[in-house]
Structure formats: C-alpha cells, structure tokens
Image (cartoon, rainbow, N blue to C red):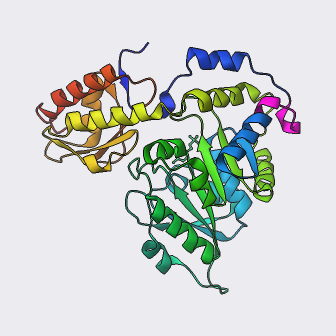
Amino acid sequence: MTDFVELRSDTFSQPTAAMRQAIANAVVGDDMVGEDPTVNELERRMGQLLGKPAAVYLCSGSQSNQSAIWAHCAPGDELLIESHGHIAEYESGGPAVLRGVSLRRIAGQGGMLTVDDLAPRLRGVNQHVPTQTLLCVENTTNIGGGRVWPFDQFRDVCDWAHRSGLKVHLDGARLFNAVVASGVPAADWAAEVDSVSICFSKGLGCPMGSILVGSEEVIAKARRARKIFGGALRQSGMMAASAMYALDHHIDRLAEDHAHARALAEGIADLPSISVSLDEVETNMVFIHVCPEWGTAEQFAAALEAEGVKLYDIDARRLRAVLHLDVTRADVDRAIIAFRKVAESEPPKAS
Ligand SMILES: *Cc1c(COP(=O)(O)O)cnc(C)c1O
C-alpha cells in the first residue's frame, strides 16, 4: 500500500480489513448514558483481564493518563515520574493545565526507577512543600527505550510508594508488549498499582481508544474527568469493537514485532557511523545512536527517508524505529539495506 517502510511509530498502523468489518458490525448505543453494549462489554472484559473492578473507555492515551491524574490528585499536589515519562514530556503540560498538579522528575535508567532513585525525592509533610500523592510509572517505557521493567523492581517500587502514602498509576500504553515479552500476565502488573492505562491505538492496531482500569471510586472520578475533558462520546462502540477485535487477534502477534525489532537491531549492529545496544532491545523499539563524526540524527533520518525508510530522530544523537503489524520481515530487510547504504555513505556536507 505504501512505497516506504514506516518505522516512525506503531500509531501509524492501519486497521486491517477484518478489524474494519468488526467495526462495521458493532452493536452500539449512547455511551454517555452507559447504553453502548460494546463499550460496556469492553470495559467489563478489561476489568476482568486486569483484575480490577472498574474500567472506562477513553479517546486517547493522554486523555486516559490525565483522567487518572485528575482522579488521584487535587490542585497543588505533586506527582513523581521518571524524567523521560510520556506524561512529563508529551502531554502538553496536562497535569498543570488540567489539575494544577506539578511534576517531580526523577532521572532513572531506561525510563525505569528504583527505590534508591525515589526515596531521596520524597518530601515531608509541611506547609512549605507540595503534597506528593502519586507516582506514575511506564511499562513498556517509550523514550526510555521500549524497555520492560524487571518484575521484582516494579513490585519493590510500587510497595515503596504505597508504604510512603502514594498512589501508583501505570501508563501501560504498551502494557501488552511487556506482557508478551516478559510472560508476566497483565493482571500481575495491575495488582501492584492503583490504576492502569492501556492504548489500543499503538501495537494493537486500532484507529483510536484507550482504557483506564482501577477501583470503582477512581474510575467514577475518571469518568467525570473524561466528561470535563470533552471525551464522553455517543456511539463509541464503533471504536470499542476494534478494541475487542484487537484483544482477540492482535496480542499474541506482538511477539512478531519484537522478533522484527531484534532482526533490525542485529542487522545494523555492525554498521559504521551508528551503534545499537542489542541488550536493550526488548520489545518493538530499536534506538539507534548516530556517531557525531557522521552527522546528526536528524540528518541521518533525512538520508534514510530518501532511501524509503521513515523514522523519528528523538534528539540530536538518537533515532527510534518502532515495529508494528504493517511492517513485514521483507520491510525489515529493506530497512537494513537502507541503513547500510546511509551508514557507509559520506557524512552530509555542513550547511
Ligand atoms: C502513545 C503513548 C501515550 C498516549 O498517547 P496518545 O497519543 O495520547 O494516545 C501515553 N503513554 C505512552 C508511554 C505512550 O507511548
């Protein structure tokens, strides 16, 4: 369908013909009054899958994370988050705008934190300091590198947070990638936290939609936030049907994206001008470091695009390639050839 290899993000994945059929056949109602049977079924199913009593279907991952923050926090509160977290970097300052919540950004490794990273950043309770109410964690990490938390580390951090009086929100935009890569079931990750957000629009291949799961109390508040944010919809069962289809057909196949990521990483690991840390390729993302002698990541991305491969430069030195259901093994081979051609080419002329 396209004459280039799309590695910018798994959000570029297109709904399949079968998914479109499921959307067309959806039985729908008015979800804003709780009468869309497909949305209701999706919320019931996700609560059950994650072992939480309640769930709410939302438009996007950002809306889902922000609704969770709205539910857990009050104005003036502070949340703790790893410095590269999506909530900190890519949600337009939502916590400040929507809830008057400030962020305490904490440097971690691979987008993940340890108790040693966190403990010194806990504030006491007194009139001078903001009230810390929430820890946000990400799994898999995105800008952290597509990494999966070691489960023991995840449990230790969540236990510490709860002992310290914090709630924990899991931004599980790609939680199913973590489930498939680690073999740890979704419910085990969810059991450690107070709320979980999952995107259907990433590797699961849906056109849109996210789910937030948690206690009845938290989800009731989040449902109110969804309405305030303008995200309560009517016949959204059309889109919930795509999510139901993805749960049945697009979870196990994430292993294929992970295998493709590994094949890409291994295929370019020995090239000059770039470097890839093979140990850090755990799911569907490959981060590529561009050596300064060659040029910038932006220049490398432009050269790759001329060879028919699209990906994002995420900072001056790093490129990110994301594998997904529209990228075949043949596409990966084509991308490897393009990488070789660019990596072995003369550095671009300084402009
Ligand atoms: C994509 C993503 C989100 C949500 O993004 P939307 O574009 O709002 O759906 C949240 N967290 C992480 C880690 C993501 O990768």
Is 337 located above or below residue 199 in the figure?
above
Q: Quadrant of the N terminus?
A: top left
Q: Which residues are magenta?
A: 30-39
Question: Could you tell me residue 15's position as x and y percent?
Answer: 56, 22
Q: Nearer the viewer, residue 325 or 319?
A: 325
Q: Residue at x 16, y 39 (%)?
A: 350
Question: Could you tell me residue 310's position as x and y percent?
Answer: 35, 28
Question: Could you tell me residue 170's position as x and y percent?
Answer: 58, 55
Residue lying furthest bottom: 126
- In reply to whether residue 37 is colored magenta, the answer given is yes
Is 273 located above or below residue 127 in the figure?
above
Secondary structure predominantly adopted by residues drawn in magenta: helix
Question: Could you tell me residue 43's position as x and y percent?
Answer: 74, 40
The quarter of the displayed image where residue 17 is located = top right
Q: Quadrant of ligand 1?
A: top right
Q: Nearer the viewer, residue 129 or 18?
A: 18
57 displayed left or right of 306: right
Q: Residue at x 35, y 34 (%)?
A: 259
Q: Residue at x 38, y 41 (%)?
A: 285
The quarter of the displayed image where residue 297 is located = top left
282 displayed left or right of 179: left
Residue 8 seen from this side? no
Q: Residue at x 82, y 30 (%)?
A: 37
Q: Nearer the viewer, residue 175 or 306?
A: 175
320 displayed left or right of 245: left
Q: Quadrant of the C terminus?
A: top left
